[in-house]
Image (cartoon, helix red, strand yellow):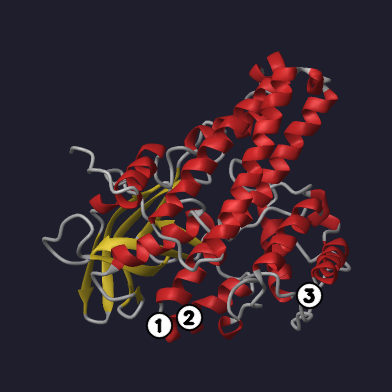
């Protein structure tokens, strides 16, 4: 598709206003001028359980955001970002939600891989990969989980052998979100023969468009296919595309997960707030807000959303979070699952019947089914509780 008339494609982003009120007005003005045409028609959709909706349009939107300097808003200026303050990032996220702007397509690149390269990468790696994230041209996926290494990431079996000037990678990853539409994957692989658990792993940057990479969609109960199996068969990447030292991948991988469970939760809440608003609107339409039990559930969901926001702000003020960041994953996974249940309960008996033949689901039904996985992927609730118990509270390790 082409960029809608009136959308900002300038390559000279405007300077960010420093006064909070002026900055909010700046965000509102830009979003009002650019969430138009096909972008506005998306109605804010896109994201978990809805990734395939308007995807190509959202790819173009990402480039519009990049051209105007709204990607990497909080990244340091010296690395191509805008150096926005925490309060500015919060204001942008709030106004983005209010504007019903399209769901983003490169969370993995902007909020996970980019900050990880800034923290652990070489200058050459930063110069090579950060611009492609900032301008919306390159998308990333995550090569962590395997059939035998899900929440227990230290059980990774995918191998990476240094042969000449390349890493040769063999193994299988699973639940690789958006692998079928990504150009690159950050892969945790075992690079030292005979190593066990979290030793001898390396964090590699691997191109997806090569003969040794095969992506197979995993059809979900929602009918979508954003998750994938990814097979590496003598796949290759350059020897210098290892982040951190070879064999030190566990430290880098844990640093990235801390970012996922801390800072990036703020961006994730853009979608959460929109979903909560849809639940509140549906409850009002059905006259359910006068029911005391429903009011209590809606109030609890609202309270949880605010707690997530405050915890994300706290995480953003203290550098790379430590193991206490597991609090965030544990909390939002449970909250989002409960919100899915709330949405279906608001629909009542209609929530048990598909919207159309043969398997057309309502938004509430898709969300309910997708959020069954929220307490599992990215580290199950049980794993998060173990991390907090052992590494934060100092309790004895769980027997193995």
Q: Is residue 199 left or right of residue 371?
A: left
Q: Residue 9 carries which label?
A: 3
Give the image location of residue 393, x and y in percent: 34, 47
Q: Nearer the viewer, mark 3 or mark 2?
A: 2
The residue singled out by tag 2 in the image is 126
Q: Residue at x 62, y 34 (%)?
A: 367
Q: Which residue is drawn at 62% across and 52% down?
A: 310
Relative vertical location of residue 287 with respect to residue 23 in this rendering, above or below: above
Q: Is mark 2 on a helix, strand or loop?
A: helix
Give the image location of residue 185, x and y in percent: 43, 63
The residue singled out by tag 1 in the image is 122
Q: Nearer the viewer, mark 1 or mark 3?
A: 1
Q: Residue furthest top?
A: 349
In which quadrant is the C terminus drawn? top left
Q: Residues within 10 Å of mark 3 (few under 14, many from 20)?
A: some
Q: In this view, does 266 lie to the left or right of 249?
A: right
Among numbered discs 1 and 3, the one appearing first in the sequence = 3
Q: Which residue is drawn at 57% across and 37% down?
A: 335
In which quadrant is the N terminus drawn? bottom right
């Amino acid at each position: 598709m082409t960029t809608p008339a009136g959308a900002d494609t300038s390559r000279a982003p405007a300077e960010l206003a420093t006064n909070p009120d002026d900055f909010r007005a700046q965000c509102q003005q830009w979003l009002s001028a650019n969430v138009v045409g096909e972008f506005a028609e998306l109605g804010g959709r896109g994201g978990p359980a809805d990734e395939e909706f308007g995807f190509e349009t959202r790819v173009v939107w990402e480039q519009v955001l990049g051209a105007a300097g709204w990607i990497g808003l909080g990244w340091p200026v010296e690395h191509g970002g805008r150096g926005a303050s925490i309060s500015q990032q919060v204001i942008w996220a709030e106004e983005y939600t209010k504007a019903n702007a399209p769901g983003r397509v490169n969370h993995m690149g902007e909020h996970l891989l980019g900050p990880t390269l800034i923290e652990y990468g070489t200058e050459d790696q930063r110069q090579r990969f950060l611009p492609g994230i900032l301008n919306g041209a390159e998308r990333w996926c995550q090569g962590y989980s395997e059939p035998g290494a899900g929440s227990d990431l230290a059980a990774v079996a995918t191998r990476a052998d240094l042969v000449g000037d390349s890493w040769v990678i063999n193994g299988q990853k699973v639940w690789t979100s958006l692998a079928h539409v990504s150009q690159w994957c950050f892969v945790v692989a075992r690079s030292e023969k005979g190593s066990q658990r979290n030793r001898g792993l390396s964090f590699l940057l691997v191109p997806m468009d090569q003969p040794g990479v095969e992506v197979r969609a995993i059809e979900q109960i929602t009918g979508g296919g954003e998750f994938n199996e990814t097979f590496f068969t003598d796949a290759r990447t350059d020897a210098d595309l290892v982040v951190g030292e070879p064999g030190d991948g566990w430290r880098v991988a844990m640093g990235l997960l801390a970012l996922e469970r801390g800072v990036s939760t703020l961006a994730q809440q853009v979608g959460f707030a929109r979903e909560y608003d849809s639940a509140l609107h549906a409850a009002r339409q059905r006259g359910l807000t006068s029911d005391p039990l429903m009011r209590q559930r809606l109030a609890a969901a609202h309270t949880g959303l605010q707690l997530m926001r405050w915890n994300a702000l706290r995480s953003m003020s203290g550098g790379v979070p430590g193991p206490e960041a597991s609090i965030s994953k544990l909390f939002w996974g449970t909250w989002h699952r409960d919100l899915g249940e709330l949405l279906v309960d608001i629909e009542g008996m209609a929530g048990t019947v598909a919207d159309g033949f043969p398997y057309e689901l309502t938004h509430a039904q898709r969300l309910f089914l997708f959020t069954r996985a929220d307490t599992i992927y990215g580290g199950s609730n049980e794993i998060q509780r173990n991390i907090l118990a052992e590494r934060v509270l100092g309790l004895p390790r769980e027997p193995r």
